[in-house]
Image (cartoon, grey):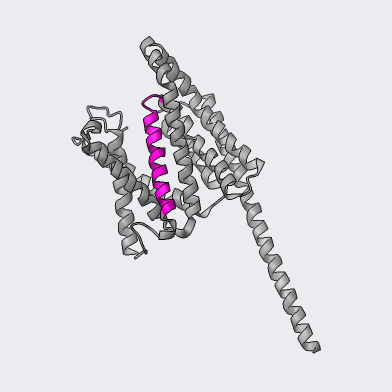
Amino acid sequence: MLQTGGNGQHPVPTLQIITCRMILTLTPGIIYLYLKSVPDFILGDREVRRLLFVRAVAGVIGVGGFYASMIYLPLVEATVISFISPLLATILTSKLTGSNLSMRQLCASCVCFIGVLCITLSKLFDSADGYYDDPNKEAHRNSSLVLGVLIALTGVVGSSITIICVRQIGSRAHPLITMNYLAYSMLFLSVILYVVPSQRISYSWDLVPEQWITLVGVGLFAFLMEILQTTGFAIDSSPRAVNMLYFQAVLALCADLVIWKTKFSVWSLAGAGCIITGLICIGDAAPQDVKSISSISTASETELQNIDGQVNDQGRTS
């Protein structure tokens, strides 16, 4: 809505949306950490600063790779490629940390990705048909397709590393500190792109009140999304939290229906069904995990009681 404008409104540049979003992420985060007297609330604990720095750099690569890929690729293609990151993060986390990734979890993650692919499939075909009508556009697409895919895949790697870093940081840093590192990096990059003459990107300041309200709303809801997402990744090391990212596609589908009155296609319904089915399959492992942990705890308590009983019996005998 902000980027397309409409009704005589000026479109808002993507970088301006990201900048406002990061300001609204950083400001309440720092204020909260300061009021709560969180130690090292600016840079975080020294023990995890390297991970925080890697998380920030990877986050910039992830965000930049996605938006830069849209210069060469249609939105739907860039979106499909970007959703490889949860699957890649799940696999890399299993390999790097040595955690067990069951075949069921891997298949469920793949089903979620197939669901995203189905949702965007019909739009992808429509976009491709319109894109190929013009021979000039077809020639331009053929020359830039590989570059666009490479940029998008670079963004996928960055997003995957971001997820891995957040999960490795865990509770060693407050989620707001982890979020602030990305905001620091994105604001620094925004200042460079705005100040450097050769790369200068202009902002649109003559916005109507409705656009400013929407811009602030985007920032505040993005803040809530990031704090919940970062906290979820930190406290849940299983693939469940990461694969919940796929549910965004279902919510976006509902938004298309409610806001833009877009009708559901068979592909869209099939994709939503795949995502929900995959998430249910992954979530079914949760009660089993809790049960196994509870059984271990119960067994340990029973063993301790038996040992205490043996000690008491020996004491009475002696």
Q: Quadrant of the C terminus?
A: bottom right
Q: Is residue 145 above or below residue 41?
A: above
For residue 308, which quarter of the picture?
A: bottom right
- 58 in magenta: yes
Which residues, given as a range, are shown in magenta? 50-74
Q: Residue 10 magenta-drawn?
A: no
Identify the residue at horizontal 38%, vertical 58% (top origin): 44
Q: Quadrant of the N terminus?
A: top left
Residue, far left: 206
For residue 308, above or below residue 121: below
Q: Position of residue 196 (x, y in %)?
A: 22, 36
Majority secondary structure in the magenta region: helix
| Residue drawn at x 81%, y 88% as measured from the top left | 317
Tell me if residue 85 can be seen: yes
Measuring from the top left, give residue 108's x and y in whole percent: 61, 39
Answer with the quarter of the image where residue 310 lies: bottom right
Which residue: 50% across, 29% down? 119
Which of 163 and 256 lies nearest the eye of the viewer?
Answer: 163
Q: Position of residue 313 (x, y in %)?
A: 78, 83
The answer to whether residue 178 is left or right of residue 206 is right
Q: Residue furthest bottom?
A: 318
Q: Is residue 312 above or below residue 130?
A: below
Nearer to me, 39 or 124: 39
Residue 297's image quarter?
A: bottom right
Q: Residue at x 27, y 29 (%)?
A: 5
Answer yes or no: is residue 233 visible.
no
Label count reads: 0
**Foreground residue, 197 or 208?**
197
